[in-house]
Image (cartoon, rainbow, N blue to C red):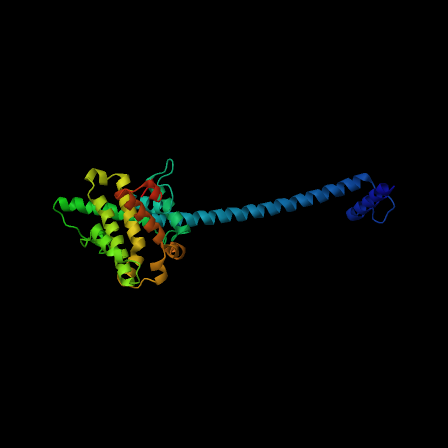
Amino acid sequence: MDFLLAEIERKSKQIEQNEVTSNKKYFRRGDLASKQAEEYKKKQKEKLKEKEEKSGKRAAEEENVFSRFKKKKDGSDAKSAMIPREEVIRRLRERGEPIRLFGESDDEACQRLRIIEMHAPEINKGLRNDFKAAMEKIDQEYLAELIKQQGGEEQGSESEEPSRVEDDGTTLDDIKSLATNMGKGDENLDQDVILKFLEFLLHLWAKDYKIRADDSKRSLEAKLAGATQRQTESYLKPLLRKLKHKKTPPDILGSLTTIIMSLLEREYVKGLKRLMTFCQKKFPADPSKSVEYNAVT
């Protein structure tokens, strides 16, 4: 019964909205159908008009974007021709992008680089990989050595930096003799022994790479070993500086555990671990007394 009442009420509202009765008690079905058809056509016209307005706006936006892109492309064609392919490859690699996509020409790769740089122009600035820098130094040193052998002169080479540890003639026996009085309250002596020992190992490590044959130096394994040595040396610079000027904090000087806990962020631990691994390889000891005996330097 409720369903019938609801249906009658719905029909009554529909008739009132279509205005087909004109205050009469009856109406014809044809009048109702024509009124509904008229309302349908009116709604369709409104939808079509709205659709045309949207398509017109979209076409105008696309035309605007195309014109702006064309202007940028025309303005950048001359500039893109000036960028060498090697520079494009270098910039793409720095941003972790492929140097060439499938079917891509040099000009298209250059345009892709410009789009990437527009979206993230400073993506890698300030975050340079120090290991990559060490690898580049190794390559520069090798090239400088070749030029020197051919009678050329080194100019502006980064390998001439005075930061490398120099050999002062100290031997392992000298360090052992100095170490007999370590840990007896003389902090200056303790710092001297630690400094000499670390510098001795760093110099020995660098010398081990330097005496390699030329063919061996060009191998990837040799370059990685040389770059690791350089990186380790840079990590240990702050510690070596403190030891040299006798300004090492007592907690660092007295406890290796404190070094591990307080200086891990400065890469001291990584550098000391690599030195320990290299020392174990250079001066073989009982494996049971070694730390990570088969570790790679």
- In the figure, residue 111 lies in which quadrant? top left
Q: Nearer the viewer, residue 111 or 279?
A: 279
The residue furthest top is 103
- In the figure, residue 29 lies in which quadrant? top right
**The C terminus sits in image quarter:** top left
Residue 201 x %, y %:
25, 50
In the image: residue 148, left or right of residue 290: left
Residue 178 x %, y %:
23, 56
Q: Nearer the viewer, residue 192 or 2?
A: 192
Q: Nearer the viewer, residue 207 or 180?
A: 180
Residue 127, above or below 293: below
Q: How many numbered marks have been drawn onto this rendered protein structure?
A: 0
Q: Residue at x 28, y 46 (%)?
A: 279
Residue 218 x %, y %:
23, 40
In the image: residue 204, left or right of residue 43: left
Q: Nearer the viewer, residue 158 or 230?
A: 230
Q: Is residue 84 visible?
A: no
- In the figure, residue 110 lies in which quadrant? top left
Q: Residue at x 25, y 38 (%)?
A: 219
Q: Residue at x 51, y 46 (%)?
A: 59
Residue 192 x %, y %:
25, 59
**The N terminus sits in image quarter:** top right
Q: Is residue 6 visible?
A: yes
In the image: residue 35, left or right of residue 295: right
